[in-house]
Amino acid sequence: MVATFEPKKDYKVVGTRPIRHDGYDKVTGKAIYGADIKLPGLIWGSVARSPHAHAKIISIDTTEAKKMDGVLAVITHEDMPKAENKMVDLGEGSVNFKWASEKLMANNKVIYKGQPVAAIAAIDRHVAEEAARKIFVEYEVLDSVTNVVDAMKENAPIILEDLIGDDLGEKIHNTNMSEHIRHDFGDVEKSMEDSDHIFEGEFNMEMVHQGYIEPHNATAAWNEDDQIKIWTSTQGAFPARTQIAGILQVNVSQVKVTPLEIGGGFGGKIPVYFEPIAAILSKKSGRPVKMVMERTAIFETTGPTPGGKIKIKLGVNNDMKINSAISEIWFEAGANPGGMIGPAAMCIYAPYNIPNMRIDAWDILVNKPKIAAYRAPGSPQVAFAMESLVDELCQELSWDSLEFRIKNASKSGTRRGDGVRFSKIGLEEVLSAAKASDHWNSPLGTPSPGIKRGRGIASGYWFNIGLKSAANLAVNSDGSVILTEGSTDIGGSRASMAMHVAEVLGIDAHDVKPNIVDTDSIGFTDVTGGSRTTYATGYACWEAANNLVIELKKRVSILWDVTPEEISFIDGVFSYNNEEKIISFKDLSSKLGDLGGPATSTGSVDLSSAGDGFGMHIVDLDIDVETGKTDVVRYTAIQDVGTAIHPSYVEGQLQGGAVQGIGWALNEEYYMLDNGSMANSSFLDYRMPTSLDLPKIDTILVEVPNPLHPYGVRGVGEVPICPPIPAIANAIKNAIGVRLYDTPMNAGRIIKNISIK
Amino acid sequence: MSSSKINKVQISTKINGQEYDLLIPPYMSLLDTLREIVGLTGTKEGCLDGNCGACTVNVDGRIVDSCLVLGPEVNGKDVNTVEGMATPEGLHPLQKAFLEEAALQCGICTPGFLVSAKGLLDNEPSPSEDRIRHWLAGNLCRCTGYDKIIKAVQKASK
């Protein structure tokens, strides 16, 4: 039985904008991020990496490295525990420990460039890096594949020999295809034939990176009693513990992960990279070992989100309704199975009520880093295809594309592509807000000579997740409350967690002291990801606060010699018999010593569903027709956020997601050479958006409370990266009459298409 | 921190108003000098090739990427980092504005942005939005989309 809640409006704390609790430490340089930790006897680790994307390892010679002054340990695959071949779900994506172990330290062959082949611990970072250059490896270079088409060809080089592909339930050997899934509903072939108009498009996208500014890092201390302590920047201390224990083949209780402050993740800091390596180096050297990844390796070996190919065919009728939809999605997995095709299939048609639909999706290995989640993993890609084709058909048929979206909009009860039916959603409210927005109703304006200006819109969707969270509370004698929880604060979540507690207890948000603790100090909590933190951990905080009220009523009952049931609690005040007796939360806190001792409580949730989120973005884009240079001149992000607990950080999520999407649309890509190396593995050449590339990003928060959360929270962080790519593609079409089917839509590609036209 | 066999160089420098005599390897960056030798970890490492600005510090009134400056180069110079911005009287107006405007999410780029923005406002107390965007283009932020950072700097401007 899932609890449902009626929305309220008269909140005291929810919807306000308190200063975040960790803010002072973060603006003064005092906050301890992963790389900032210092321990007695600390030494540094480094890895030697493969220069090839696909090669057999003939031999590894560590002699010279071991001889170097200051080198304390050298390890290769021989030092890695043999992990078992099984899949473990980590909230967003899953992991096979055998492959995860070999991904971190190559066994007999390398399958992506930069894959570690040996690791060194030395007295300082400089010596460790020098020693890594003295690891000599003999390779037999193999042909590599770097795109889904080549990887699916007959006679393509096989990347993982022990991969068994799953083709709609049928087992396939000797393949690079890890999975093929299908969702089928209605009579899709006949409805397509019967449609008044049929439109098709094929879209191609390059891999992109999450681009967090903080490098991956890990510090490990393997104690003599085989207790392993890890300090790291991770989106989930518990899922990190699961991975570390699985790769090291120890019990989870032997691993204590302390999550330090994290400098961005966007899904990319769910997998572990250095943690198990640092642990083994620590065991071998007897010293705590710290490792920090260099930026080239971050691009070459961690976290990208898949590129690939998407084909869509839409059948529409003259009544402006979509009658039939058929799509095929081929996603790059990287060098291990990827697992982002499932979410892509869930998202592709989500903003539309379509009676007949089919989706086929394939996950395909290529000699590139294994993909990780990136903000609504899979959804921006399919949004690019779907929202571009919707725009195209509306132009061809002279239909207003916003009216078309309103006419076909999903509502409560609409069937999503994978079969799930939506509960309470706010897409129609979002589209109405877009239609009423100042941006939509403002003229485009006149650009300078030589510049063409266009406007584009697009919808976006993410399902948001729930999963497991725990929270503990303890009352201080001064009327404040200690909150202990396990969700890494990646963007201000301490404030929203504290606000959940403060709202229940009727106290100030700053009278709640949030603490994010290690895996020995709180119940299992899933990743900060999937837009789940404010929803699920917030829910656990709310539950803990309600349990605290129950406990405190018992204490008041001792004080007044009445039963707890006779006591009411409103706005931070306990009262009896129509306020005959009253005591505030703060006054009570100072008396707890004589009323049974410390008052504590706990909240623990496992939420199977969350709140589906929809958004629409509007962009005005200038294009210099001589050079192809683009300039975003106005941008508005509109989204149903459920209830905004701390509106500033909700706006920030919309703005940040939009800008990551703008970068993906216009410039970012893995520029791969034929030999499988990335040609642009630095921030200079990868070229993410800077402040100079952007206007202000306006936000419109639409609040359709989610009945599954006590305050109506939906996840907000992922939806906003979905609309920007198609919104920009549609603006380009509007500006210069050219439809781009490939990302990135950079100056070169625009100019090429202008000249073809 | 460094190998004992390497000949170290001695430097005298002022960091956040405090005099330091340091013995460092000649190849050590100013970033590592601050983080590993002096223990000021507020200055962050992001890319080590001068492209993200997370390690921005102020040397003799100029903002620099401390990963691209060698420690020995600041001999006799005046270095200011994020740790030097607040005073016993309280936060610098930029720090206060960053908090009030929610101009940070993960916060890893924040020290670099604060030191960069201070470098601007020290010389130009009332910059235009375009001037702020241009000045801060050497600092990457991946979380915020820059909107609230720009608003915070405008708020701290006169």
Image (tube, coloured by chain):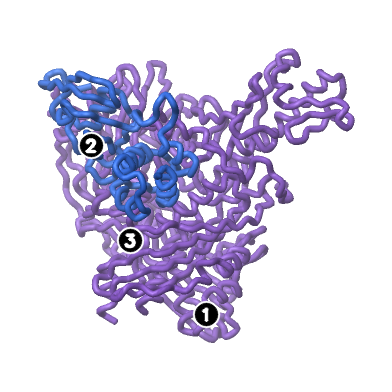
Given the image, on which type of amino acid does mark 3 rest? Glu
Residue at the farthest left position: B7
Q: Residue A642 location in percent, x, y?
A: 62, 53
Q: Nearer the viewer, residue A66 or B106?
A: B106
From where the camera sits, is residue B5 visible?
Answer: yes
Query: Percent from the top left, x then y, of residue A363?
Result: 40, 58
Circle 3 residue: A206
Q: Which residue is mark 1?
A: A315
* Three-letter residue code for mark 2: Cys
Q: Is residue A750 above or below residue B55?
A: below
Q: A587 left or right of A377?
A: right
In percent of width and height, residue B79 lies at 25, 30
Picture quarter with the C terminus of chain A: bottom left
User: Which residue shows up at 55% across the image and 64% down it?
Assistant: A350
Write the residue at 47% across / 28% down.
Answer: A251
Chain A's shade in the image? Answer: purple
Tell which subunit mark 3 falls on. Answer: A
**Foreground pick, B151 / A575:** B151
In this picture, is A136 found above or below A231? below
Residue B59 lies, with reference to residue A391, above or below; the image says above
Q: Chain for mark 1?
A: A
Identify the residue at the far top of this view: A594
Whether labels 2 and 1 belong to a single chain: the reply is no
CA separation, marks 2 and 3? 31 Å
Give the residue at mark 2: B67
